[in-house]
Image: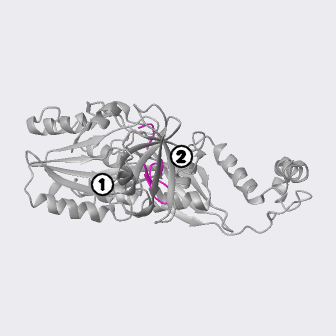
Amino acid sequence: MNHAARTFLTTVITVFTGVVLFAGGFVAGHFTVLPDIPGLPALGLPTSAGGTPAGLQATFAPFWQAWTIVHQEYVDQPVKDQDLMQGAIRGMMAALGDAHTLYESPQEYAIDDTSLTGQLDGIGAFVDKGNGGLLIVSTFAGSPAAAAGLKAGDIVVKVNNTDISAMDEIQAISLVRGPAGTVVHLTIVRKGSAKPLEFDVTRAQINVPSVESKMLPGSVAYLKINDFGSTTGNEVNTALSALLKQQPRSLILDLRNNPGGYLDAATEVASQFLPGGKVVLKVRYGDGHEQVYNATSGSSATTLPMVVLIDGGSASASEIVAGSLQDNQRASLVGATSYGKGTVQQIHQLSGNGGYIRVTIARWLTPVGRTIDKVGLTPNVAVPLTQDDATAGRDPQLDKAISILAGQSGMLPVGTPVLATVTP
C-alpha cells in the first residue's frame, strides 16, 4: 500500500484515503461552519479590488487582475466561477505545503464523510492509488465487485470509458460511485492478461462494518478494525465481549490498511486494552500547549497477551492506538512501518455551498512523547507482506503474530518504548 487510505468502492468505489478517509486518514477533532464574511467581494466579475478589506487590497490586486483577464480573454467562454473559486482555494491550501490541509468540494467531502458511516452505495471493494489507476486491494464477500469477478491486484484504468490514470484518487472514486441499481463499466488491467478486461458492475448499497472478529486456532482471538468511525467504539466493545466469552488465551488486533478516522474513536478503542488512567496520546497545538487523553475504563482484555498488526496503510487513528499500546508496554507491533500521520485536522464548512477545508491545527504524540509524523511507527517484529502473498492468499504477518503468541518470543518484555526518539 502506498498511502494511508484504503478506500471503499461504494457511491464510487469508497474509503482510504486513504488517507484517503479518506481518508484517510484524517483525525478530525472539530467541525465548524464558516459564515458569510461581510465586505468580501461576491463571486461576480469585479472591476477593482474595492470589495477586498483595505489591509489586503494590495495583496489581492494580482488575484482580481488575473480573475478579470480570464473572464475577458480566455478562449472558451463563459468560464465557470464555481470552478475558479474552488481552484483558488485548492491552491491556497496547497501553498501551505501540508498534505493534510486541503480543500474538498461538496461532492468530494461527501465521499470522505460517508466512508465513516458504514453504509454506502457502490461496488463493494477496498481500493488504493495504484500505478496508472485504482488498485483493488480486496472485495467484500457477496459484493457486486466480487460477483462481477474483480480480484485483488486488479487496476481500474478506465471508468465508463474515461481514462482515470492521471486523476487523483477522489476524482477517480467519484466516477465509480453512483446510486444503487445503476451500472458502471470498468476497464481493468490484470497481471497475466495480455490485454485489458471489461466489466459491467451493478452498484448496490454496501454495509461496511468497521470491526470484524473471529477465533483462530490455538484459542487466539482476532479483532480487525477497518476504520475509526462513529460506531467503532461500540462495535469493538460488542466484538470483544463475544470473543472473551470463548476464553481466548491471547489476542491479535489487526490495524493493517486502516486509514484512521475520529480521535474520540481511537481513544475509546485504546481504552478497551489499557487500565484506566494510562495515557493514550498527547495533542500539541501551535501555541505550545498540550492536551493529554487518558484511557477511560478498560475491559477484561487489558491483561491478555496481545500483538498488534500494522503496515504502511495504518494511519492516523490506527497509529494512535498502536503507538499507545506499544508505549504503554501493552503489546508488540508486528508487520511493516506505519504510514506516519501525526497531525490533527479541523474541518470547516464554507458558506454558500462552497465546500470544506481541512486545516491542520495540532500534532499528536505517543504517550512517551514520540512524534510519528512522516516517520511512522516501527514494528517490534518486521515482517513484509508482498502483493504476491496477498494474491496467493498468504499472510506471513498474521502467521508471525500467531507464532509469537504461541511461544511468547518476540513479545515486548512486556514492551519496550522507543525512548531514543522522544521529543523535547
Spatial CA span between label 1 and label 2: 23 Å
Q: Look at mark 2 in the image and give the residue it sits on.
A: 169
The disc labelled 1 sits on which kind of residue?
A: Ala
User: Is residue 23 something one can see in this rendering?
Assistant: no
Which stretch appears magenta?
1-21
Q: Look at mark 1 in the image and give the residue it sits on.
A: 141
Q: Are marks 1 and 2 in contact (CB under 8 Å)?
A: no
Specify the quadrant of the image occupied by residue 385: top left
Q: Residue 382 location in percent, x, y?
A: 28, 30
Q: Residue at x 88, y 57 (%)?
A: 49
Rendered view: 272 above or below 326: below
Considering depth in this image, is 92 or 202 the residue closer to the camera?
202
Mark 2: which secondary structure? helix
Residue depth check, mark 1 versus mark 2: number of the one nearer the observer: 1
Majority secondary structure of magenta residues: loop
Question: In this rendering, would 228 be left or right of 325?
Answer: right
Q: Residue 60 location in percent, x, y?
A: 82, 51
Rendered view: 139 above or below 178: above
Which quadrant, please, contains the N terminus?
top left
Residue 2 counted in the magenta span:
yes
Mark 1: which secondary structure? loop
Considering depth in this image, is 35 or 423 the residue closer to the camera?
35
| Labels in figure, total | 2
Q: Residue at x 51, y 55 (%)?
A: 184
The disc labelled 2 sits on which kind of residue?
A: Glu
Residue 357 counted in the magenta span:
no
Q: How is the image coloured?
A: one colour
